[in-house]
Amino acid sequence: MVTSEPRDIIEAGPHEHGRDAGGQASTASVPVLLITGPVGAGKSTVAAEAARLLREANIPHAVVDLAWIEQCWPVPADDPWNERLTHRNLACMWANFRQAGAGRLLLVRVLEDRSLLRQVAEAVPGAEITVVRLRAPLPVLHARIRSREASDPNWFLGAATHTAKVLEQARVEDHLVNNHNRPVAVVAEEVLRRAGWLDSDAEA
């Protein structure tokens, strides 16, 4: 198991949420945990289990797989992955989640460049973002894809190979967690603990 050194926290821009002791506008901090990894790394599965653990710990939160909220056709020629639409949708969803009582946000996406976190910070005022990358050997990624995409796995196999290589080089993560030959509950708990979300003094 390998971990990177923690990065600087990405914070959102100004958003009034009361006043501090000096009378200045203040922003309520929002812990955001982004689970990334190559295609087939188990991001969605681990996120779902992490959400279950958070419910058991009575920690108010919301979960969003960003791949699901960008699905709109046609896509702009200058934004083939619908990043702008994704984060406009995220901003709307987070406003509703916040009003419903969520204090933390768990996100899932393939994050190839840390600069993309700026869009998350704009969508979620006060965001304090931690990135955890899941790692598994390439043959394991391919086996998972063949199992779940039995009809036509070729695109996904290529995407897994590409994103695994890119993420190993980019090192976008604050923490790296192995997701191979381990129970999903164990992996999810490690992800949450590395992010500080299951510490005894963590607050929603």
Image (cartoon, rainbow, N blue to C red):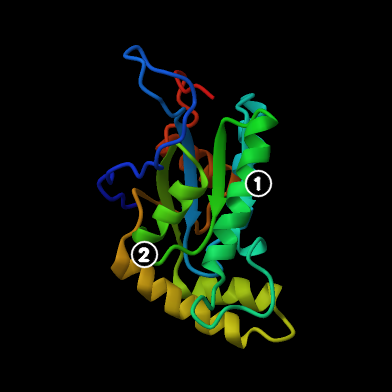
Residue at 45 percent across and 25 percent down: it is: 199
Viewer-side label of 1, 2: 1
Q: Position of residue 114 (x, y in %)?
A: 35, 59
Left or right, 106 with reference to 193 = right
Between residue 143 and residue 125, name the one nearer to us.
Answer: 125
Between residue 2 and residue 8, name the one nearer to us.
Answer: 8
Marks 1/2: CA–CA distance: 23 Å
The amino acid on which the numbered mark 1 sits, given as a three-letter code, is: Met
The amino acid on which the numbered mark 2 sits, given as a three-letter code, is: Asp
Q: Secondary structure at mark 2?
A: loop
Between residue 75 and residue 174, name the one nearer to us.
Answer: 75
Between residue 114 and residue 179, name the one nearer to us.
Answer: 114
Seen from this angle, which residue lies furthest front?
23
Q: Position of residue 183 (x, y in %)?
A: 58, 49
Seen from this angle, which residue lies furthest left?
5
**Circle 1 residue:** 93
Label for residue 25? none
Residue at 50 percent across and 21 percent down: it is: 203
**Circle 2 residue:** 113
Tag 1: Cα neighbours inside 10 Å, few (<14), some, or many (≥20)?
some
Would you identify the image quadrant in which residue 188 lies? top right
Residue at 58 percent across and 80 percent down: it is: 156
Residue 65, placed above or below residue 142: above
Camera sees residue 42 = yes
Tag 2: Cα neighbours inside 10 Å, few (<14), some, or many (≥20)?
few
Q: Position of residue 66 (x, y in %)?
A: 59, 58
